[in-house]
């Protein structure tokens, strides 16, 4: 799934550690507090744009275009913003510069932020949230 692939890119780029400072999916069981870390990330997928089809593939999807939300949560505003910005800077992939790349074993043409990180208020545990959305274009997985 796309959220697993993007989470893997964050781990690969040393932004966060899976199940410690990185959780996947809107229904992820979030910790009440993260021991040893002032902030953590949640990556979740949501509906994207229509798929790209090509004449060679008929009705099959050539490239899917799912979207994701990446949200940093934490009690220390500076740490939350720093983690959100680290994820924001680590994720983009521009097809014009590199022709795409494999992410989690799936070919991605692009990973594009839809806006800069913004303050989203507080989560259910009273922690600050800072997040941004991404659009991707990738081979179906």
Image (cartoon, rainbow, N blue to C red):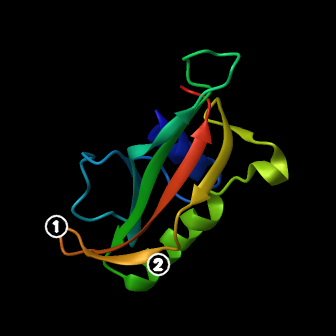
User: Does residue 61 appear in the picture of this structure?
Assistant: yes
Residue 76 is situated, as x and y percent measured from the top left of the image, at 36, 82
Which quadrant of the structure image shows residue 127? bottom left
User: What element does badge 2 sit on?
Assistant: helix
The answer to the question of whether label 1 and label 2 lie on touching residues, with beta carbons closer than 8 A, is no
Q: Regarding mark 1 in the picture, which secondary structure is present there? A: loop
Seen in the picture, residue 118 relative to 35 is either above or below; the reply is: below
Tell me the quarter of the picture where residue 102 sits: top right
Q: Which residue, given by chain and number where applicable, does mark 1 sit on?
A: 124
Label ID, residue 67: none
How many other residues sit within 10 Å of disc 1, few (<14), some (14-19) or many (≥20)? Answer: few
* Residue located at (39% from left, 69% from top): 39
Q: Which is more N-terminal, label 2 or label 1?
A: 2
Does residue 130 sit above or below 138 in this rendering?
below
Q: Is residue 132 above or below residue 48?
A: below
**The disc label shown at residue 81, or none:** 2
């Amino acid at each position: 799934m796309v959220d697993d692939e993007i989470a893997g890119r964050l781990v690969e780029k040393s932004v966060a550690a899976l199940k410690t400072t990185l959780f996947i999916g809107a229904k992820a069981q979030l910790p009440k507090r993260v021991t040893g870390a002032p902030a953590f990330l949640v990556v979740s997928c949501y509906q994207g744009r229509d798929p790209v089809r090509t004449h060679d593939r008929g009705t099959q999807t050539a490239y899917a275009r799912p979207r994701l939300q990446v949200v940093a949560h934490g009690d220390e505003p500076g740490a939350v913003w720093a983690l959100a910005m680290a994820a924001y800077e680590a994720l983009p992939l521009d097809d014009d510069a590199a022709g795409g790349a494999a992410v989690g074993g799936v070919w991605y043409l692009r990973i594009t932020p839809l806006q800069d990180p913004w303050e989203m208020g507080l989560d259910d545990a009273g922690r600050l949230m800072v997040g941004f959305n991404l659009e991707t274009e990738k081979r179906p997985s």
